[in-house]
Image (cartoon, grey):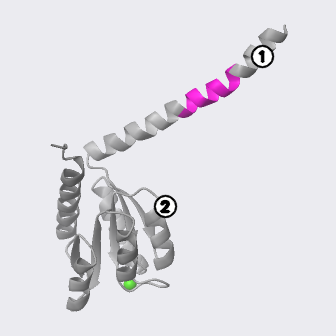
């Protein structure tokens, strides 16, 4: 009887471990599936709610999964802590501007970043690319152009990270 009880006790953590592994595998499988079908996860960092909602609607319509953040400092933390495939990054933001975010993220991660710049911010565009943004687009932009740039940036990034070692 004591032996049986011990066996039952052993079973419980094993089952939990096994279930955890199943869930983890499922998450990894979903992630690779999402990547295959182009359903990348995009973080939209934009403090103008109308633009953010418009982008969210358009991107989800295209099959991307999205999240949005309006505060610069929180955006920086989320980019570092959460798992996104690409970031759309506005420049003028409360608490931390987009250029500073980009600069800080680049110290830790090579996640693709597309800067959203206001018209005539030529210096910001150049600075954005200099500090490691992958691309930029000028507001107001045609959604088709942004989608094309997102796809191109994701392709470039996936090619550079999945290239087999020689
Ligand atoms: Ca802004």
Query: Does 119 sit left or right of 23 as displayed?
Result: left
Q: Give the image location of residue 88, x and y in percent.
A: 32, 70
- Magenta-colored span: 11-20
Q: Quadrant of residue 87?
A: bottom left
The Cα–Cα distance between marks 1 and 2, rounded to whole angstroms, is 40 Å
Number of labels in the image equals 2
Q: Secondary structure at mark 1?
A: helix
Q: How far from the left and from the top, in percent, is residue 157? A: 23, 57
User: Which residue is found at the position 49% from the left and 61% from the top?
Assistant: 81
Task: Kindly indicate the quadrant of the structure image that contains residue 4.
Answer: top right
Label disc, if present, on residue 6 of the rendered structure: 1
Please give the name of the residue rendered at 45% of the width and 34% of the height, measured from the top-left corner: 25
Q: Nearer the viewer, residue 44 or 83?
A: 83
Q: Is residue 129 within the magenta segment?
A: no
Q: Is residue 90 above or below residue 111?
A: below
Q: Seen from this angle, which residue lies furthest top?
A: 1
* Quadrant of residue 132 within the rendered picture: bottom left
Q: Residue furthest front?
A: 166
The quadrant of the picture occupied by the C terminus is top left
Q: Would you place residue 26 above or below residue 57 in this image?
A: above
Q: Residue at x 63, y 30 (%)?
A: 16
Is tag 1's residue or tag 2's residue first in the polypeptide sequence?
A: 1
Residue 147 at x, y percent in the picture: 21, 64
Q: Is residue 26 visible?
A: yes
For label 1, the crowd category at 10 Å Cα-Cα, with few meaning under 14, some 14 to 19 and many 20 or more, is: few
**Is residue 96 positioned above or below 144 on the image?**
below
Would you name the residue on which mark 2 appears? 81
* Main secondary structure of the magenta stretch: helix
């Amino acid at each position: 009887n004591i032996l049986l009880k011990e066996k039952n006790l052993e079973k419980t953590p094993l089952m939990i471990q096994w279930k955890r592994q199943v869930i983890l595998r499922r998450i990894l499988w979903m992630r690779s599936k999402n990547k295959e079908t182009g359903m990348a996860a995009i973080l939209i960092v934009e403090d103008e709610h109308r633009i953010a909602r418009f982008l969210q609607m358009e991107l989800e319509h295209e099959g991307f999964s999205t999240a949005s953040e309006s505060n610069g400092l929180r955006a920086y933390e989320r980019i570092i802590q959460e798992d996104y495939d690409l970031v759309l990054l506005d420049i003028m933001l409360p608490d931390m501007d987009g250029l500073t975010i980009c600069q800080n993220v680049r110290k830790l991660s090579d996640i693709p970043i597309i800067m959203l710049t206001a018209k005539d911010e030529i210096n910001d565009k150049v600075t954005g690319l200099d500090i490691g943004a992958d691309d930029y687009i000028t507001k107001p932009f045609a959604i088709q152009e942004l989608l094309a740039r997102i796809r191109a940036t994701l392709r470039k990034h996936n090619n550079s990270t999945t290239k087999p070692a020689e």
